[in-house]
Image: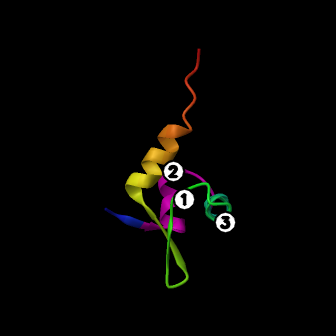
Amino acid sequence: MAMLTLTEAAKRCGFKYITLWTWVQKNKIPHYNIDGSYRIDSEDLNKFLESKKVVAK
């Protein structure tokens, strides 16, 4: 289980930091709050992104 900061997660998936921060604030993505610092499990990030995939017809 690799824990990513929001900055690391944003770089990994190509989103801006503020996008991930907003998702965390709205509880749209699984996350941990460790001493006031948000972390996202890399497996949870992959599952979240996979669940949002849209297949072209």
Where residue 17 sits in the image (x, y, percent)? 62, 63
Q: Nearer the viewer, mark 3 or mark 1?
A: 3
The secondary structure that dominates the magenta segment is helix
Label 1: element kind: helix
Q: Mark 3 belongs to which amino acid?
A: Gln
Quadrant the N terminus occupies: bottom left
Pointer 3 or 1: first along the chain: 1
**How does the figure colour the protein chain or chains?**
rainbow
Point out the residue furthest to the bottom here: 35
Label 2: element kind: helix
Contact? badges 3 and 2 (CB < 8 Å):
no
Where residue 2 sits in the image (x, y, percent)? 34, 63
How would you rate the neighbour count of disc 3 (Cα within 10 Å): few for under 14, some for 14-19, many for 20 or more? few
User: Which stretch is magenta?
Assistant: 4-16
Give the numbered dot on residue 10.
Answer: 1
At a point 50% along the width and 85% down the height, the residue shown is 35
Where residue 6 sits in the image (x, y, percent)? 54, 66
Q: Mark 1 belongs to which amino acid?
A: Ala
At a point 48% along the width and 64% down the height, the residue shown is 8
Give the numbered dot on residue 13.
Answer: 2
Asked if residue 20 is positioned above or below residue 54 in the image, the reply reads below
Pointer 3 or 2: first along the chain: 2
Point out the residue furthest to the top here: 57
At a point 51% along the width and 44% down the height, the residue shown is 49
Separation of marks 3 and 2 at Cα, in angstroms: 18 Å
Q: Mark 2 belongs to which amino acid?
A: Cys
Separation of marks 3 and 1 at Cα, in angstroms: 15 Å
Is residue 41 part of the magenta span, yes or no? no
Front residue of 2/12: it is 2
Contact? badges 2 and 1 (CB < 8 Å):
yes
Determine which residue is flagged by label 3.
25
